[in-house]
Image: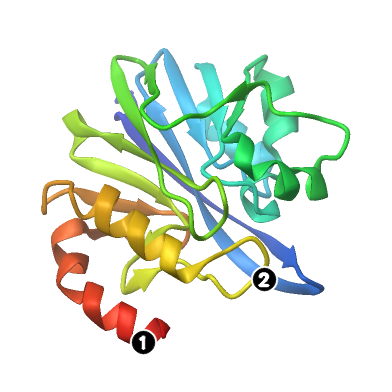
């Protein structure tokens, strides 16, 4: 049997609710590490599907890029199942409490933190805008960044709902993400991956469109 690679991936389906609306969504759940231990990024919708992908490996942490309900709704269940801490930037508290009012995250996720699982290092890049404490996770050795809902193929994440700001997300992308090497693969919270080099030339278009 071939051992798992440093990046595993499952797609889970459910809903996203905010500001009185509910939408059907498919989420990318990223599992990063080696054959012994992993980090789970954005535990969404389907605990059993995520747990099956983890298998017998130790979960070092359940990392939340942000606290919209479609990215955290299974975080406590998965954390309890694998005896792992939940990591989240504290600025996400108002959104987290909408979904989990009786359960706080276990540890804070701060800009510059380095998380490690199976020899893979993920550097936390705080990228507010889509939400107040949105974070991306950059793995230099893997040439990839896990962008949550900050950057997608074709532009920035949505900023039309509560706790979001377009100017802030543009600043985050410009200063934190577009500073990464152009061949860095952007593994997004929804949909297909892209690269920094593919997205960087379109920054001014996004700004014009956003305003």
* Horizontal and vertical percent position of residue 165: 52, 66
Which of the 4 image quarters holds residue 24?
bottom right
Relative to 79, is 64 on the left or the right? Answer: left
Q: Residues within 10 Å of mark 1 (few under 14, many from 20)?
A: few
Q: Quadrant of the N terminus?
A: top left
Q: CA distance from mark 1 to mark 2?
A: 25 Å
Where residue 14 appears, as percent x and y from the top left, is 69, 60
Does dot 2 land on a helix, a strand or a loop? strand
Q: Which mark is residue 24?
A: 2
Instruction: Classify residue 97 by image quadrant.
Output: top right
Mark 2 surroundings: few (<14), some (14-19) or many (≥20) residues within 10 A: few
Above or below 27: residue 62: above
Q: Looking at the image, what colour scheme do you see?
A: rainbow
* Local SS, label 1: helix
Q: Give the camera-side residue of 206 and 39.
A: 206
Position above or below: 83 against 72: above
Q: Residue at x 17, y 46 (%)?
A: 180
Quadrant of the image containing the C terminus: bottom left
For image coordinates 70% across by 53% down, the residue present is 69
Q: Earlier in the sequence, mark 1 or mark 2?
A: 2
Q: Nearer the viewer, residue 111 or 53?
A: 111
Q: Nearer the viewer, mark 1 or mark 2?
A: 1
Instruction: State the residue position of label 1.
Output: 209
């Amino acid at each position: 049997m071939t051992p798992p690679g440093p990046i595993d991936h499952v797609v889970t389906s459910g809903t996203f609710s905010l500001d009185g609306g509910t939408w059907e969504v498919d989420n990318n759940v990223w599992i990063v590490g080696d054959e012994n231990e992993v980090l789970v990024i954005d535990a969404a919708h389907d605990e059993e599907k995520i747990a099956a992908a983890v298998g017998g490996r130790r979960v070092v942490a359940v990392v939340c890029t942000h606290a919209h309900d479609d990215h955290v709704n299974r975080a406590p269940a998965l954390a309890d199942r694998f005896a792992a801490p939940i990591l989240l930037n504290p600025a996400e508290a108002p959104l987290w409490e909408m979904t989990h009012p009786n359960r706080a995250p276990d540890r804070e996720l701060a800009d510059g933190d380095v998380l490690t699982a199976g020899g893979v290092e993920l550097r936390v890049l705080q990228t507010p805008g889509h939400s107040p404490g949105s974070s991306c996770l950059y793995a230099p050795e893997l040439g990839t960044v896990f962008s949550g809902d900050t950057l997608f193929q074709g532009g920035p994440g949505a900023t039309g709902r509560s706790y979001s700001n377009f100017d802030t997300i543009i600043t985050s992308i410009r200063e934190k993400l577009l500073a990464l090497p152009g061949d860095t693969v952007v593994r997004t919270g929804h949909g297909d991956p892209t690269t920094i080099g593919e997205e960087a030339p379109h920054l001014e278009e996004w700004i014009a469109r956003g305003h």
